[in-house]
Amino acid sequence: MMDLREFVARSMERTRKYTLDMVKDLTPEQLRWRPAPGANYVAFLLFHTFRAEDRYFHRWISGDGELWKRKGWSKRWALPSPPSDSDPIWTTGNSWTVAEVDGWQPPPLAELLDYGETVRRSALTVLRDFDLARLMDVPRLEFPNLTLTHYLISASHHEAQHQGQIDYLLGLMTGRQRG
């Protein structure tokens, strides 16, 4: 019988395969294309997706700290200057203003995907070793309703939500129906 860890892992792996299939051949121009001013673009959505997964698994589930900092990714890519009152979650792209998204220069696709793969390999290890007795643990005391169960649920569908946005953008960009 499949347990929760295996279910979440399979969900994450299946979604990632579809994401990679959609973006693997995109040019830098396609990665930054947007249908209108203020809209997100593919590279930003990939960055946000990978950063959120890093945060879920390495800050809140394992408590070991995000690979973003531990492995030096935060030094490789310049982010916009955060507002003085920003929450640390800001580094995932959450709450970025239109100007911040517009001004950010994403790294090449290969680097983005390398970060995503590094996070994914480590996240799956964290998940494999996760003690199911901890499901109701609350890693952020200021948010008592956000248990580790919440983060595992989010990890199993967050990328799929953004994958749908990427698929939509690619359909608008190419004029071809996808799906």
Image: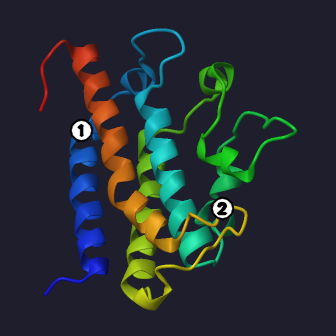
Residue designated by label 2: 143
Name the residue: 27% across, 47% down. 20
The residue positioned farthest toward the front in the image shown? 145
**Label 2, label 1: how far apart the Cα atoms are:** 35 Å
Relative side of 60 to 8, left or right? right
The crowding category of the residue bearing disc 1, from other C-alpha atoms within 10 Å (few below 14, some 14 to 19, many at least 20), is: some
Q: Name the image quarter holding the C terminus.
A: top left
Name the residue: 60% across, 40% down. 93
Name the residue: 54% across, 75% down. 61
Disc 2 is placed on an element classified as loop
User: Label 2 amino acid?
Assistant: Phe
The percent position of residue 62, horizontal first and vertical second, equals: 56, 79
The percent position of residue 25, horizontal first and vertical second, equals: 27, 35
The crowding category of the residue bearing disc 2, from other C-alpha atoms within 10 Å (few below 14, some 14 to 19, many at least 20), is: few
**Looking at the image, is mark 2 or mark 1 earlier in the sequence?**
1
The percent position of residue 47, horizontal first and vertical second, equals: 50, 43
The percent position of residue 133, horizontal first and vertical second, equals: 45, 90
Whether tag 2 and tag 1 are in contact, CB under 8 A, the answer is no
Q: Quadrant of residue 105?
A: top right
Relative side of 96 to 18, left or right? right
Name the residue: 66% across, 72% down. 65
Q: Is residue 106 depicted above or below 153 in this figure?
A: above
User: Label 1 amino acid?
Assistant: Met
Q: How is the image coloured?
A: rainbow
Q: Nearer the viewer, residue 42 or 84?
A: 84
Q: Is residue 137 depicted above or below 76 in this figure?
A: below
Residue designated by label 1: 22
- The numbered disc on residue 67 is none
Q: Is residue 131 depicted above or below 168 in this figure?
A: below
